[in-house]
Amino acid sequence: MKVGTILSLIMIGMLVFLAGIGIMRFLGDADVGKLLAENNCGVCHDMTARQKHGKGPYLWEIYNRPAGVVDFPFSPGFKKLTTETPFLWDEDHLDRWLIDPVAFIPQNKMVQHTKDHPLSFDGIKSAANRKDLIVYLKTLR
Ligand code: HEC
């Protein structure tokens, strides 16, 4: 085989590999999402089939669940918005909620406004990480 052919094959191999990584990032990775969820959400949310509320409502079967319907003492701000304009926790709504909960629902109580509250949550800023998280949330069923 000629050196040129070998080099071309190597180049093609690399392109296929990189495209694969690109597609993986685009689709999201549930294993990464699980780690992110354990680290960022687990302190307040139960994600198991036990369906126990913690500081926040349980997240079992959260994907496509109507917002604010489980029996949990939601904040007045959250209750008002989800009663007046009901929606499902689909990809778009989860993404909007996770990037910046306050921008989506002002005065929600998921975000503790005290700066150094040990449980404060102010959003997942990386689009790739939000994707991973949402892919994981879909598996909770
Ligand atoms: C500081 C505790 C806390 C953390 C951390 C937290 N949440 Fe929450 N979450 C809450 C609370 C409290 C509510 C209810 C909000 C309200 O009533 O205003 C909530 C509500 C929600 C809801 C709406 C549920 C429903 O039934 O409508 C979703 C979805 C959600 N959280 C997902 C997440 C995800 C995913 C993470 C991690 C990336 C996370 N939360 C991190 C406390 C938290």
Image: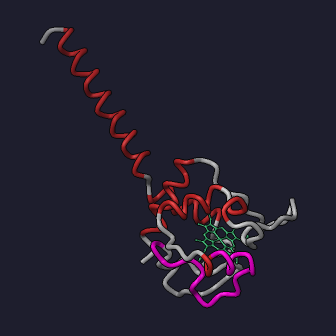
The percent position of residue 37, horizontal first and vertical second, equals: 58, 64
Q: Quadrant of ligand 1?
A: bottom right
For the record, the magenta segment spans: 63-81
Q: Is residue 71 shown left or right of residue 122?
A: left
Question: Which quarter of the figure is the N terminus placed in?
Answer: top left
Q: Is residue 110 shown left or right of residue 136?
A: right
The percent position of residue 3, horizontal first and vertical second, equals: 20, 9
Is 96 drawn above or below residue 65 in the view shown? above
Q: Closest to the observer: 116 or 109?
A: 109
Q: Is residue 73 magenta?
A: yes
Q: How is the image coloured?
A: secondary structure
Is 51 drawn above or below residue 62 in the view shown? below
The percent position of residue 127, horizontal first and vertical second, equals: 55, 48
The percent position of residue 96, horizontal first and vertical second, equals: 59, 59
Judged by its main secondary structure, the magenta piece is loop
Is 134 drawn above or below residue 70 in the view shown? above
